[in-house]
Amino acid sequence: MKEFLEGSQAVARIIQLCKPGVISAYPITPQTHIVEELAQMVADGHLNARFVNVESEHSAASVVLGASATGVRVFTATSSQGLLYMAEVLFNIAGLRLPVVLTCANRSVSAPINIWNDHQDSVSLRDSGWVQLFAEDIQEAADFHLIAYRLAEDKTMMLPVMVCMDGFILTHGIESVEVPTQEQVDTFLPTYQPLYKLDPENPVTIGPLVDPEYYMETRYAIQETHKEGLKLIPKITAEFSRVFGRIYNGLIEEYRTKDAERVIVGMGSVCGTIKEVVDELRAKGKKVGLLKITSYRPFPGSQIYEALKNIPKVGVIDRALSLGSYAPLASEVKAVFFGKTKKPKIISSFILGLGGRDITKYSIKEIFRLLNTKEKQGEFIDLKPELLKENYE
Amino acid sequence: MNKHLFTSGHTACAGCGQAIAARLVVDAAGANTIVANNTGCLEVFSTKYPESAWEIPWIHSLFENAAAVASGIEAALIYLGKKDAINVIAQGGDGGTADIGLQALSGMLERGHDVLYVCYDNEAYMNTGVQRSGLTPFDTNTTTSPVGGKSTGNIRPKKPMPEIANAHGIPYVATASTGFPQDIQRKVKKALSIKGPKYIQIHVPCPLGWRHEPKETFEVAKLAVETGLYPLIEYENGVLVAVRKLNPPKPVEEYLKAQGRFKHLLSNPEEIKRIQEIADNNIRKYNLKTEQENVSPAS
């Protein structure tokens, strides 16, 4: 049934339908609405779960780690500093191969403190072993949580999944959302059956000391699993389409790229703005398109290659930085084409929308315009030059 | 008990007080127990892959989060309807408990989880090479509170962890010692018979870090108690209900001279006097020296 829902409400409704046994979270803007909704559902008896109010994000992640290791489906959510504070535990959850699902309400990282949206938090955790799915709109944010649990708990994966949704833009925005029935969700998402769990009937040691004789294979295994993930995600999204009717590729989405001369690559809610600009420019006969990356981890290199190999001019949008080096997404898209004969003539890199700086249609049009000039390396869009002048006298 | 739940074959040093105490704890807790363990000596010497000394379900995550991991295990067991049949123990060393893990522990105690937290207190970061922790005693020579021309060792007394735990209003707090094995097991069993958060801190000699002979572990542990430097106490619902009486207390010098970590004090009567004052304060505070019979049922 279609309902008019805030993004956080929509996510909470989906989590309710996924029936986690343990939820734990710590307050941080803009993630709070999600867990407030879930706390109310538990309080009202509409969700049979243990809601554990912790003293920090570090403990929120640790609580769901412990509960997941006991064989129970779990959920947590955070943003920004909270995600960074969890970082140590998040690497640990991936290393322990626990199918935790986390919502990251994407927000910038301090200092200066700023509660608004960019991707620096989750992008900084890209090496943690977690799957990262970026949502474009509220429907995707909701649906990706269903896909996240299926993916995380699949026996070929057994890895945690982070659903990334732009803070405020998606968490606090309101859209018409298709909310599935419990029956549909139960068809798609069976009860979680762990491979191993903490159980006195069959005692196991989880998290032992692993020396140089064995450690490297555990990391290799996660790397190989991510490759399997690239095959598994489209299978799961195909099944999702059969049950729920909505079609996702799950790795990338190509929007009017087939004959395009200029294509922008982006992640998250900015893709909605780009689609509008693409439609406007197409109406004027400009051959432009969008490549949306949904799965940032695993990184769909060969899919990106196929989508862009015949596009002459590509511009990559980063809403995060790797300070002191190339923009994270742009450098990875460029790496896809290293040594290839078929490749774009230009792959330009643009930084925009940091700390909630609005990304308007003009910003996107400016990028399409700049794609007709020489290749740009980490070009900041919408900078205010007047703020960059400072006297040190 | 024929079968130990913490078995031989682990790689602890000879005379390790923590290994002895850990076995006593899990044997007292029984097979229906899940343990969450902080990083530290115990985790390292008992689980070097592909071997494990644990015959019960056991998990290690990080240095500071065993209390939070155990909170999650407890929440999951309640969700599964299994909590009444299964004990949950979180455990760690003194650094993992009183320093880096204090926040997670405080959260667990405050939230009222039905978990027993056991702190194995060997009074320094032994696993990383004897660095001082918040539970290192006054004037102790460690690698980061070294003795020198301007230093007599660690500048602060032990952080009062049992009192900090007790201040959370939890139903049971106790201290114990490797030197009194039956007392450890009695306290573990008592703690596990009580619903809610429980805290037991066990004094566990470390021959390597304390620099005493491995064969002297029990003797050194007993001396800490008998001098009043490590009082054995029990709080129930915030009230001090039992202490181990000292008849009479031994001078602290007897405890200090048995260990290399205090060797620098033996030629320094002023410092010994200050340590005797710490013991005397404990004796007064907990009323360890009285004429009446031992009120603790401990042996």
Image: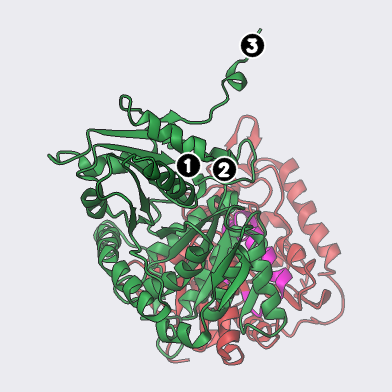
Chain colours: A green, B red
B222 left or right of B260 in image:
right
- Where is A319 relative to B235, above or below? above
Q: Which mark is residue A319?
A: 1
Point 37% across, 34% down: residue: A349
Q: Are marks 3 and 1 on the same chain?
A: yes
Q: Residue at x 80, y 52 (%)?
A: B277
Q: Residue furthest front?
A: A284
* Viewer-closest of B275 and A253: A253
At label 2, which amino acid type do we have? Val
Of the image marks 1 and 2, the number of the one nearer the N terminus: 2
What SS does tag 3 mark? loop
Range of the magenta residues? B90-116
Tag in front: 3 or 1: 1
Q: Point out which mark residue A109 bears.
A: 2
Name the spot of residue A385 as percent of width and height, x first: 56, 20
The residues tagged by marks 1 and 2 sit, at their Cα atoms, a distance apart of: 12 Å
Residue flagged by tag 1: what amino acid is it? Arg
